[in-house]
Image (cartoon, rainbow, N blue to C red):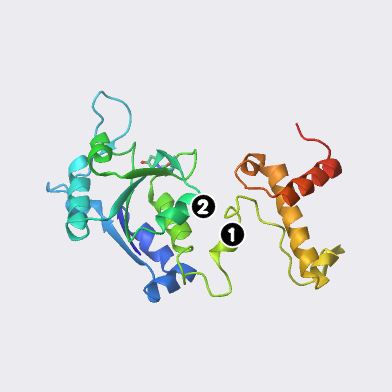
């Protein structure tokens, strides 16, 4: 899978993504990441990429021409590439979107700066707008890296063999159950004995109940789209009894 990132700060992208799992995925040729400086597509001697907003107002707006040239340059080589703009106005990003984007062979990720990008970029070149959350960043670069990380890790072969993205939290829309490792006893705080019982049925039941309890307490909004089984509903009833009705 190929990721082209259009940014004014390519250095923010390349170095961090060479590390760890994504770095190995690049070495294994599972993903290809190329950061392109939008300023390389400005044509005036001052290499201008932004200008004041029509209608007045604070800050600067990124100009359409350099971005248009950058996208058209890539699309001329790869017409099927999907162009995604990272913006607070975008559709909230989630695991489901990460999984569906992982079927795209080539993504172009546009990173805004300043007050944003000229609206005609969206109208003429953007296939999809994505937001990573309801807060304002100084630029779209970190958002692009979040998308690259979440999409790449569901690609076959990116996560080591010992780990498949299918077991993820959110893949079944529930929060993850608590995890423990050695030592068994830390300052008197012990690991739940069921996890050392070797009884895999009891262990997976405990984990399912813990995942349901955690989701019910922290993200009840997720329960609605979790596809609960009859057993899940019985476990939830137990949890409610044990923890008192929530509003
Ligand atoms: C953002 C977000 C985000 C807005 C102004 C870049 C900044 C600046 N992108 N999810 N939240 N972008 O805050 O994706 O241009």
Q: Secondary structure at mark 1?
A: loop
Q: Position of residue 115 (x, y in %)?
A: 34, 36
Q: Which mark is residue 95?
A: 2
Mark 1 near mark 2, Cβ–Cβ under 8 Å?
A: yes
Q: Which residue is rendered at x = 64% and y = 51% of the image?
A: 174
Q: Secondary structure at mark 2?
A: helix
144 up-or-down from 156: above or below = above
Q: Nearer the viewer, residue 28 or 238?
A: 238
Q: Around disc 1, counting alpha carbons within 10 Å, would you say few (fewer than 14), some (14 to 19), or many (20 or more)?
A: some
175 up-or-down from 26: above or below = above
- Cβ of disc 1 within 8 Å of ligand 1? no
**Drawn side of residue 26 relative to residue 225, left or right:** left
Q: Taking the image as drawn, is residue 200 in sight?
A: yes
Q: Quadrant of the N terminus?
A: bottom left
Q: Which residue is denoted by mark 1 in the rendering?
A: 168
Q: Position of residue 133 (x, y in %)?
A: 49, 42
């Amino acid at each position: 899978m190929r990721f082209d990132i259009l940014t004014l700060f390519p250095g923010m992208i390349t170095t961090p993504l060479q590390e760890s799992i994504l770095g190995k995925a690049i070495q294994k040729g599972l993903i290809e990441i190329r950061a392109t400086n939008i300023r390389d597509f400005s044509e005036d001697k001052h290499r201008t990429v932004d200008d004041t907003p029509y209608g007045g107002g604070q800050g600067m707006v990124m100009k359409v021409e350099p971005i248009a040239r950058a996208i058209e340059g890539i699309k001329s080589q790869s017409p099927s590439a999907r162009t995604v703009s990272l913006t607070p106005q975008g559709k909230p990003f989630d695991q489901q979107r990460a999984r569906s984007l992982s079927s795209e062979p080539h993504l172009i990720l546009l990173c805004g700066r300043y007050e944003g990008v000229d609206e005609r970029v969206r109208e003429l070149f953007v296939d999809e707008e994505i937001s990573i959350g309801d807060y304002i960043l100084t630029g779209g670069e970190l958002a692009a890296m979040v998308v690259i990380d979440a999409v790449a890790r569901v690609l076959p072969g990116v996560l080591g063999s010992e780990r498949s993205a299918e077991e993820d939290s959110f893949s079944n829309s529930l929060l993850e159950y608590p995890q423990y490792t050695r030592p068994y006893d830390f300052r008197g705080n012990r690991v739940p004995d069921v996890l050392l019982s070797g009884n895999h049925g009891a262990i997976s039941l405990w984990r399912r109940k813990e995942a349901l309890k955690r989701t019910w307490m922290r993200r009840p909004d997720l329960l609605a789209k979790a596809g609960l089984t009859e057993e899940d509903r019985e476990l939830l009833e137990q949890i409610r009894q044990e923890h008192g009705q929530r509003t």
